[in-house]
Image (cartoon, rainbow, N blue to C red):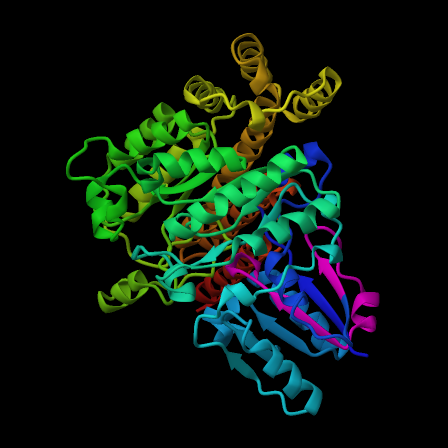
Amino acid sequence: MPNALLVYPEQPPTFWGADYALEMSGVKATFPPLGLLTVAAMFPPGYELRVVDMNVSALQDADLAWADLVFTSTMITHHVSLQAVVERCNGAGVPVVAGGPHPTTFHGDIAGVDHFVLGEVEEVFAEFLRDLEEGTAKPLYRETGKPDVTRTPVPRFDLIDVKSYATMCVQFSRGCPFDCEFCDIIKLYGRVPRTKSPDQVVAELESLYRLGWRGPVFLVDDNFIGNKRDAMNLLPEIARWQKTKGYPFTLITEASANLALMGELMDAMIEAGFDTVFVGIETPNPEALLKTKKQQNTSKNQENYLFTAVRKIQQHGMQVQGGFILGLDGDGEGVFDAQVEFIQETGIPVAPVYLLTALKGTDMYERMKSENRLLEAPLGTNAMPLNFTPEMEYRTLIEGYKRVLATLYDPTLENYFSRCLILFRHLKPVPHLRKPRSRSEIDTAFMAVRRRLSARQIPAFSKFIGKVSKDYPRMLPEAIYLAAMGHHFEKIARQQIAIHDFLSFLRNDLEAFPEAASGSASEVHEMGSRRQTSLDRAQQRYDSIPDEFRYRGDGLQNALESYQHALVSRGRNLGRAAVA
């Protein structure tokens, strides 16, 4: 009986990882590895299965000793940890099978994997396992079609401890009808959304309920309303199930901004238990949106279309979380203030802002390639990488991006809490979504957050909680949760800036240091002293970066060592020049 070990590699700190907020809640990870759990349900009888989520617990040598095969599923952010997992498996002599969005696009860059199973695997996985059992498995399998997701099994949630996570996940649909230039979703899953049946989705919710889960559930669709008809058929079924169980779950999903035009559908979402929706807003600049083929975020007939859309969704009773991008073609230097103003005035507390990346396989990547604008850059665990030449001057873009982060998530969190209050002012109260909490529960959560906040954040936090207690008392639990997220976002912003500034310091200092010199021994001595001063200063800056900001793949140690080696080499050149 083969032992199959399903390993989910470690994710580096990100805005969405909520790493610093998780410290306050006692859970270990934000989301479970839904892809791996879905694959686990596709194994036939006869396999022994275990899941190791490295974001919850470490991968032990004993796990590899038990395993006959290791299966992994990863996204781009996991690539550094994936390589480390593969190397450990190679060393232990355990074959590795890799799949997921990252290998599907970048399998040519991944060494040491025995078998790749790429794309959506529902219709190719059984073939791979048959070949494996017969000893004829090929190095690569790829599902070229778009599987019928009505045949996708209920994920094996029983293989994890659900209490280790902040939020559970289910999937309703795959694909998106839009054609945003920078997005790889349509390349991976297509532009015709495929949906599960209402019975399937309810069965997944029931599975979580029976395992004891109570709390948030994220419908991980890239656009929940991509197939509006099927969404409308699903929502009443979820609402009926939720009502019979007393609304055990609050639901979250992703949708395009045109959700705001669908009043009936928003009402149905509220009835089903949705309280949050993530919207890819990107930028308030219509010119940049049109250049990147995101016309669904614009309107010829309505000014401030996106602002109005956010407000309508809030007024229906759902918090809007927004994704934002800087570096788009068509953005001028005014975009930085415009981003901050839009996010502040709409009241979007959770508003991660990213620099644009031209993802391999997207239309944007091909355009940048044809325009000779692609750059060599790491896949993206380092802070603020750019893999293309932006229209805006590079330094202006980077400095503007840092200013946006530092303003939205300032060290006091005053701007952040201001956004929270604007949200509460416009968020329609929905009783079945805001269940009363006991005073002791609220006090415990309050103290868990307060203990983690810095001294600079306590005054704004106390003022915020006081205001919510007086004006929006039912929102106190949400206010405390948002405060935890604010703490996390401020730390992530500070971490990204600190890492970028350190790497920039090394690069700039090295560029300013002379390659060689010809002249007297005194000049050599002077340059040697300067080199030692630079080495000491670099080490001090490295040591000043908090340990909690460091992670596998941050590039800091390698960058410091490369810098040190380069300076020492130049010192030898200086000595040889003086002797000559």
Give the image location of residue 488, x and y in percent. Answer: 57, 34
Question: Horizontally, is 60 left or right of 283 in the view?
Answer: right
Residue in the picture at 29% in, 41% down: 396
In this rendering, the answer to whether 130 lies above or below 121 is below
Locate the C terminus and report the quarter of the image it occupies.
Answer: bottom left
Residue 302 in which image quadrant: top left
Residue 15 can be seen, yes or no = no
Residue in the picture at 65% in, 37% down: 244
Residue 134 versus residue 282: which sits nearer the camera? Answer: 134
Residue 475 in which image quadrant: top right
Magenta stretch, residue numbers: 50-78
Give the image location of residue 109, x and y in percent. Answer: 50, 73
Question: Horizontally, is 246 left or right of 350 in the view?
Answer: right
In this rendering, the answer to whether 490 lies above or below 476 is below
Say whether residue 264 is magenta.
no
Say whether residue 54 is magenta.
yes
